[in-house]
Amino acid sequence: MPVEWDEKGSAVAAAISTEGGKDYYIDNDHKGLELLDLLQEEVHATGIVREIGNKKRITVLVYM
């Protein structure tokens, strides 16, 4: 799901929302930027999860 937009209204950041209601904000590295093409699609992702403040972030290593 998109979580941040540019001035033209295009998504520039996204998060993975789980069935359990948790949101994982995706790092904007190479794999993370690829996922911007899959907004609102179901994906399975594996990566490194960390908590910063009250937000969970994920560095996606593999997705399908």
Image (cartoon, rainbow, N blue to C red):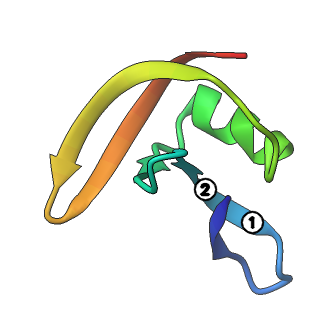
| Amino acid found under the numbered disc labelled 1 | Ala
Q: Residue at x 61, y 29 (%)?
A: 30
Q: Is residue 29 left or right of residue 36?
A: left
Q: Position of residue 56 (x, y in %)?
A: 29, 50
Whether residue 42 is situated above or below residue 56 in the rendered picture: above
| Amino acid found under the numbered disc labelled 2 | Ala
Q: Residue at x 32, y 24 (%)?
A: 48
Residue lying at the far left of the rendered structure: 53
Q: Residue at x 54, y 45 (%)?
A: 19
Q: Is residue 18 left or right of residue 1?
A: left
Whether residue 42 is situated above or below residue 40 in the rendered picture: above
Q: Is residue 48 left or right of residue 22?
A: left
Mark 2–mark 1 CB contact (< 8 Å): yes
Disc 1 marks which residue? Answer: 11
Badge 2 marks a residue whose secondary structure is: strand
Q: Position of residue 10 (x, y in %)?
A: 82, 71
Quadrant holding the N terminus:
bottom right
Within 10 Å of the Cα at label 2, are there few (<14), some (14-19), or many (20+) other Cα atoms?
Answer: many
Q: Nearer the viewer, residue 57 or 42?
A: 42
Quadrant holding the C terminus:
top right
Disc 2 marks which residue? Answer: 14
Whether residue 19 is situated above or below residue 59 in the rendered picture: below
